[in-house]
Amino acid sequence: MKNLLLSLIAVLFLSSCSGSGPTACGCADMAIEALTEAFSNLDMSEEEGEKMQAKWEKKMKPCEEKGEADAEFRKEMEKCLAEKMMEEESAE
């Protein structure tokens, strides 16, 4: 289960968004949503973890593809992700 979460996190952090899809900050929002779901379900079975990982990989695929093609977009997504994580931390 721990490996599934780590791979999910890696996919999400290395992602950005596609042209007609969400914005860079939209991808960051999805990444935060995926991480929140993953960490709120740490006791799920390996099968459930694999299903959740597949769901988020599918949702984040446009982000990943755009990030691979556009380094500037990836930087913007990473910036938004960092800002949103800081907001989440200060809200706690």
Image (tube, rainbow, N blue to C red):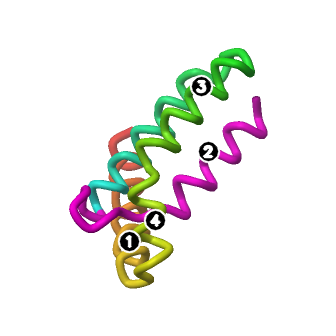
Q: Position of residue 52 (x, y in %)?
A: 56, 28
Label located before the other in sequence (3 or 4):
3
Q: CA distance from mark 2 to mark 1?
A: 19 Å
Callout 4 secondary element: helix
Q: Which mark is residue 51?
A: 3
**Residue at 45% over, 71% down:** 67
Q: CA distance from mark 1 to mark 3?
A: 29 Å
Query: Of residues 73 and 38, which is closer to you in this image?
Result: 73
Q: Residues within 10 Å of mark 2 (few under 14, many from 20)?
A: many
Q: Position of residue 11 (x, y in %)?
A: 58, 54
Label located before the other in sequence (4 or 1):
4
Q: Which residue is mark 1?
A: 79
Q: Which residue is mark 2?
A: 8
Q: Amino acid at mark 3?
A: Lys
Q: Which marked residue is nearer to the observer: mark 3 or mark 2? A: 3
Callout 3 secondary element: helix
Q: Which marked residue is nearer to the observer: mark 2 or mark 1? A: 2
Callout 1 secondary element: helix
Is the residue 54 above or below the residue 42 in the image? below
The reply to whether the magenta stretch includes residue 7 is yes
Q: Amino acid at mark 2?
A: Leu
Q: Which residue is mark 4?
A: 65
Which region shows up in magenta?
1-24
Q: Residues within 10 Å of mark 3 (few under 14, many from 20)?
A: few
Q: CA distance from mark 4 to mark 1?
A: 18 Å
**Residue at 44% over, 83% down:** 71
